[in-house]
Image: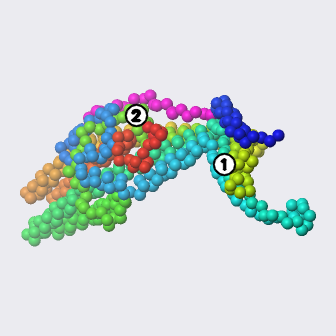
Amino acid sequence: MRSSPLSFPHAVGTALMLAASILLSGCVVGPDFAPPALPAMTQVTTAPLPTTTTSAATTGGAAQNLVIGRDIEGEWWTMFHSQRIAALVVQALEANPSIAAAQATLRQAKENTRAEQGGFFPSLSASSSAEREKTSAVTAGLPAGTNIAPLSVVGASLSVSYNPDVFGGVSRSVEQLEAQAEYQRFELEATYLSLAANVVTTALNEASLQGQIDATNEIIRLYRDELAVTQRRLDLGGVTRADVLTQQSNLAAAIATLPPLLKQRDQQRNQLATYLGAAPSQISGPPLDLADLTLPEELPVSLPSAIVAQRPDIRAARATLHAATANVGIATANMLPSITLSGSYGAQNSSFGNLFTPAGLIWSVAGAISQPIFDGGTLSARRRAAVAAMQVAAAQYSSTVNAAFQDVANALVAVQRDADTLRAALDSEQTAASSLAVVRGQYDAGAVTYVNVLQAEQLYQSARLSLVSAQAARFTDTVALTQSLGGGWWHRTDIDPSVADCCGIFK
């Protein structure tokens, strides 16, 4: 019996109804991802810290209040009220190649996710062909010498193929790729945060070294002045040649400390150029002056549960755990039956004019199911490996959380202790300066020897350099605390639109 061409739509409808019933009865295998529980503790340090740091009447000596629950600005570096710092960070975020690489990696991950989502839909393809051939009589089974006319065959068809996601293998694959894209999203945020923090810290270190260089130059000038005075006293017979040689040695020792400081400053400048996406020869301008910066009077302190939500590295580790969990579902689905539905509809005839007549219509509907029976234990082993990988990701997530809490605790302790250090350094510097002035007066009056003057000068030199380092530490501690808390990325508005959130998966 000849089948009617109109039977094809009926057959397709039956196939689609079958596919729908299969999908409705299907399930997504594998464990569903559940975000790890938030920590219940209320502090990250062993003992509660004071809410206010000590103060000192010098650069970077303002008292800072630790405010629990205070939010962090997206452009947190503006809290120093320095146009120079703001300009450096903006340039780095715009020009550093690591930002461009992280953005491109995120775009790649998102496009891979979109590509995998195509597995939810049927695939449709069209084809057409035209052929003309002449065969021999022998090939056609006719007597030799029979003339066979050339034969023309033209055709056009549409083919559809569909693999119902009965056990959720495609769903888990998409879920895995979405988690990988989320990982790249927070890797991008971590790149933004670390780059901004490195730029600010490097600029502060350069300023600190420049301050130490200035202090050393001043000490060298004092030593030279003292050497000139000692030389005149030698000419007048007031001191011995040994006193002059001792002062010369003291001056030479102070001069010898200058080149290492200059080297470190120049290396910091070269590092800063790299962060800015430039060569060392392409940046200019003097280093920052710490006296031009404002130390923030309020610092945020986040609860442990907020730290877990804010830190980009923790969010990235959670995404890795999510991807590993979805991979267990993929491995499980690969062990179960797979179904393929296909169909084609078209026409074939001897000429284009007769191509779409009822006599030339052709169609087919097919379904197939396959089930792995024996594979030498490969699929089972792969699933066990996926479970082990999920366990690894869970352990690494816990390690990342603990390391984050350590960072925050270290930063909080540094904020408190370095404030105490600055006050002590200021007291030491002021005491050393007063002591040097007194000893010099006593020496001028002949009450002490020149050895006492040298000892007082060395103490003052050491105290002065320690003060400059302690001043810079107050600013770098603020940067470290802000970075350890996540840097306020959730308030940033400078994200490249091409890598902005789509489909709501990065909330």
Measured as percent of width and height from the top left, residue 37 is found at 49, 31
Residue 296 showing in the rendered view: yes
* Left-right relation of 221 to 67: left
* Left-right relation of 374 to 143: left
Point out the image quarter for the N terminus.
Answer: top right
Disc marking residue 45: none
Q: Is residue 209 above or below residue 114?
A: below
Disc marking residue 158: 1
Residue ID for mark 2: 306
Residue 30 belongs to magenta span: yes
* Left-right relation of 59 to 171: left
Measured as percent of width and height from the top left, residue 98 is found at 42, 55
Residue drawn 74% across the image and 56% down it: 350
Chain-order first, disc 2 or disc 1: 1
Residue 403 showing in the rendered view: no
The magenta segment is: 28-53
Three-letter amino acid code at disc 2?
Answer: Ala
Q: In this view, does 261 lie above or below 120?
A: below
Measured as percent of width and height from the top left, residue 337 is found at 72, 38
Three-letter amino acid code at disc 1?
Answer: Leu
Q: In this view, does 203 lie above or below 266?
A: above
The part of the image, by quadrant, that contains residue 419 is top left
Point out the image quarter for the C terminus.
Answer: top left
Viewer-proximal residue among 381 and 31: 31
Residue drawn 75% across the image and 48% down it: 359
Residue count near mark 2 (Cα–Cα under 10 Å), binned few <14, some 14–19, many ≥20: some
Viewer-proximal residue among 415 and 143: 143
* Left-right relation of 443 to 212: left
Q: Is mark 1 on a helix, strand or loop?
A: strand
